Amino acid sequence: MQFTISVTINAPARTVYKAWLSGKEHSKMTGGKATGSARVNGRFTAWDDYVVGRNVELRPSKLIRQAWRTTEFKSGQEDSILQIKLHPKGKNKTKVVLTHSNLPKSDLHYKKGWKEHYFQPMKEYFG
């Protein structure tokens, strides 16, 4: 199963991209402790180690693709794939299009989580 959601953020794509991959900025942006990496195959954590993963593909200011899982994933369950596409909208806005795939149907609740625990805090953080 997969789903796609989007939001427009009041920041340039470059700023959103860097914040997503920086542990320090990711923590500030979401309110949960994170570690980060701006390298392919670099590992990261988010939300106080609730989320762990690695960067699969990075295109600066355009695309972040990550192998992603939470502590709720079953033992032996494959990583899900998180894709974040960044589309500049004028000089200081970015449309963030998030696609979360390789999930069982029972994990549809992550869709609500992205809105509540990422998009809303990001809108506030970038003001």
Image: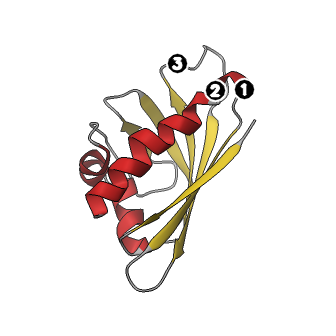
Residue kind at label 1, given as amino acid type? Pro
Residue kind at label 2, given as amino acid type? Asp
Q: Residue at x 44, y 32 (%)?
A: 51
Residue under numbered circle 2: 107
Residue kind at label 3, given as amino acid type? Glu
Q: Is there CB contact under 8 Å for labels 1 and 2?
A: yes
Choose between 118 and 101: the one closer to the eye.
118
Left or right of residue 5, residue 16 in this image: left
Residue 15 visible in rendering: yes
Q: Find numbered disc 1 in the image and state the secondary structure of the residue it sits on.
A: loop
Q: Residues within 10 Å of mark 3 (few under 14, many from 20)?
A: few
- Quarter of image, res 17: bottom left
Q: Residue at x 58, y 29 (%)?
A: 109
Q: What x and y, as percent, mark residue 59? A: 54, 68
Left or right of residue 55, residue 5 in this image: right
Of all residues shown, which one is farthest toward the top? 75
